[in-house]
Amino acid sequence: MGKILIAGLLLCGLLAQAGCTPAPASQPTPLASRVSAGESTNRITQSASATLPVDSPIPEPSYTPLPTLTSTITPTPTPREVRFAVIGDYGSGEEAEQRVADLVLGWNPDLVITVGDNNYPLGEAATIDDHIGRFFRSFIHPYAGIYGPGSTTNRFFPALGNHDLYSEQGTAYFDYFTLPGNERYYDFTWGPVHFFCLNSTDSEPDGVGRSSVQAAWLQVQLANSTSAWQVVYFHLPPYSSGYQGSVDWMRWPFAAWGADVVFTGHDHLYERLEVDSIPYVTNGLGGGAIYPFIDVLPQSQFRYNSSHGAMLVTVSESSMVFQFLADTGNLVDQFELRK
């Protein structure tokens, strides 16, 4: 694909390895401070007292499919450069989510994408506005919640997580958001980026396997994309060294189909892997209890779970710069893709 993956940046020798505490920083470290490709990033930090809540089983197929996918992508703004945030497993409504939201709002990104579990613990209508709108209403359109005005255009594009489907097969989620396509999986463009959001939960009526209707849709949409960059995101990670582990049914040939990067969540940690020469990023530190690493996969390049945080991605026609920052504002990992 003619892109080069440049190794990420680890600040202060990874908190748990060196025992040091980085100085607070209100803004991401300037891009000029990137570390060279030869510097090692394969170090581990773990929270010794990590809580281990066990997710309930993913819901069985039971809900009725929503309207058929639109045949065209959703029109969105076309700036030359785009800055978007990635958050995952964030919808707790607790203080940890507030810290991550403050971090993200401080960046003033063009849009926010999520990798699922937007509304803990059961995806109920009674909690959804408190767990999402209270923090991110300024990105949501139309917004009809109680926390003030929303956005004039939609800038919030979530993926379904298993916790979003536990009550009434996700009715609260589908009522709360107005999303492209059938709202379970969809695509849209923003500037030089073509985004593809998937439903990785096995309650998806169009399937989750490599030969499913959903997978066939993605393959066609990626092949037809004319954007500079193709970003795929969903909840359950195909590869993870974390407590929840890898999910085999989402091991689709994303790189071969044309994806440049894959974002997932579900494991409450941060991990960057390289699979088929493209980055796979698990980004589940948005506000839920932090999980430990268990069995480190050979594809793993970088791992972190010492605090909550989020990703900021800056995209031009020729490059994508990825930064994961802790909720303190400290830069934890940074890497880049170039044409």
Image (cartoon, rainbow, N blue to C red):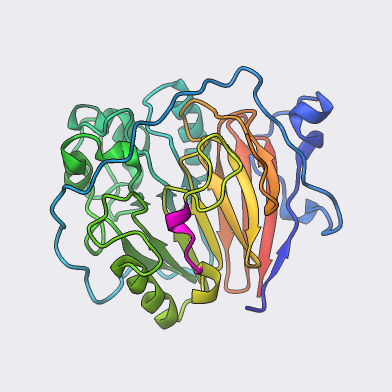
Residue 223: image quadrant is bottom left
In percent of the image, x 46 and y 34: which residue is there? 101
Image position of 67 (left or right of 307)? left
User: Is there any visible trace of residue 200 in the rendered image?
Assistant: yes
In percent of the image, x 35 and y 73: which residue is there? 216
* Number of marks present in the image shown: 0
Q: Is residue 218 above or below residue 163?
A: below
Magenta span includes 250: yes
Task: Give the magenta-colored segment's residue range.
Answer: 248-253
Image position of 185 (left or right of 247)? left
Return the residue nearer the eye: 309 or 206: 206
Q: Quadrant of the C terminus?
A: bottom right
| Extreme-right residue of the structure | 38
Image position of 229 (left or right of 127)? right
Residue 136: image quadrant is top left
Residue 27 position within the rendered picture, expressed as x and y whole percent measured from the top left: 64, 40
Q: Quadrant of the N terminus?
A: bottom right
Q: Is residue 166 above or below residue 98?
A: below
Return the residue nearer the eye: 307 or 154: 307
